[in-house]
């Protein structure tokens, strides 16, 4: 029996919430593997919402390793996101999608590496997102950026049914390490 995407998202949200409750230290352990991430001077992170794996410890680890950080900003709901330079502790405001984002005075940058939250991933680079299309539109507009999921290892599934607009990931970073996809 196959679940449609709406049902699959609902089931995976519930799973991610359980994973967050039973393993609150997973984000810190994932950050311990920051040195395994692909190269990139500018790394795009995100500010976790709900049960998304928190990227705070990863931000600190990446900045300590000399990487520059940025966060995505939604200016229009149907357009690719832009990225603004950011460091932990700098002020944020809500963007057009209601996500915490750097202030407009922050420099707009082009990340080499984009870390994305997700609901599920498969061993072929498939990613199930929240359904808004923000990351898929952004990935399509930035084909040279390396795309990495940031998730709990327990969010892995056997295979995701992808649509034409779904853009595959190059790898995933979890509390168990970094995995590159073929």
Image (cartoon, rainbow, N blue to C red):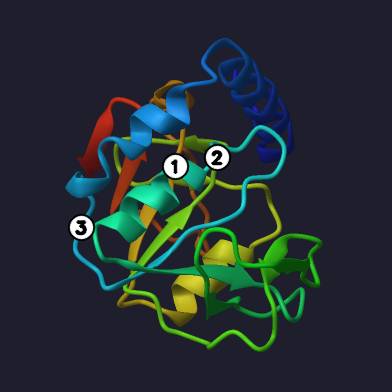
Q: Determine whether 100 is above or below 75 in the image.
A: above
For numbered disc 2, what is the local secondary structure? loop
Is disc 1 in contact with disc 2, using a CB cutoff of under 8 Å?
yes
Screen quadrant of the N terminus: top right
Q: Residue at 25%, 65% (x, y): give it.
A: 66
Residue 31 higher or lower than 72, as above or below: above
> Can residue 182 be seen by looking at this rendering?
no
Query: Which disc, if any, is residue 57?
Result: 1
Q: Which mark is residue 54?
A: 2
- Kindly state the secondary structure of the residue where label 3 is placed: loop
**Where in the figure is residue 117, as x and y percent of width and height?**
53, 47
Horizontal relation, residue 26 to residue 165: left or right: left
Report the residue at 36% width, 77% height from top.
143
38 lies above or below 33: below
Look at the numbered disc 1 and give the secondary structure of its residue: helix
Closer to the camera in the image, 61 or 76: 61
C-alpha span from label 3 to label 2 = 20 Å
Position of residue 2 measured from the top left corner of the image (x, y, whole percent): 59, 25
Q: Which of marks 3 and 2 is in front?
A: 2
Label 3 crowd bin: few (<14), some (14–19), many (20+), radius 10 Å: some
């Amino acid at each position: 029996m196959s679940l449609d995407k709406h049902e699959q998202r609902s089931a995976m949200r519930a799973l991610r919430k359980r994973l967050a409750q039973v393993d609150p230290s997973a984000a810190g352990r994932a950050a311990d593997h920051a040195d395994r991430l692909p190269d990139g001077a500018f790394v795009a992170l995100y500010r976790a919402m709900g049960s998304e794996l928190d990227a705070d410890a990863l931000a600190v680890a990446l900045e300590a390793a000399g990487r520059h950080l940025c966060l995505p900003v939604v200016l229009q709901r149907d357009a690719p996101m832009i990225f603004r330079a950011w460091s932990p502790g700098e002020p944020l405001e809500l963007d057009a999608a209601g996500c915490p984002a750097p202030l407009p005075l922050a420099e707009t940058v082009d990340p080499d590496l984009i870390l994305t939250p997700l609901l599920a991933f498969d061993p072929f680079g498939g990613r199930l997102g929240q359904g808004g299309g923000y990351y898929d539109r952004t990935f399509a507009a930035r084909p040279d950026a390396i795309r990495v999921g940031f998730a709990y290892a327990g969010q892995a599934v056997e295979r995701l049914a992808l649509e034409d607009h779904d853009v595959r990931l190059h790898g995933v970073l979890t509390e168990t390490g970094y995995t590159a996809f073929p």
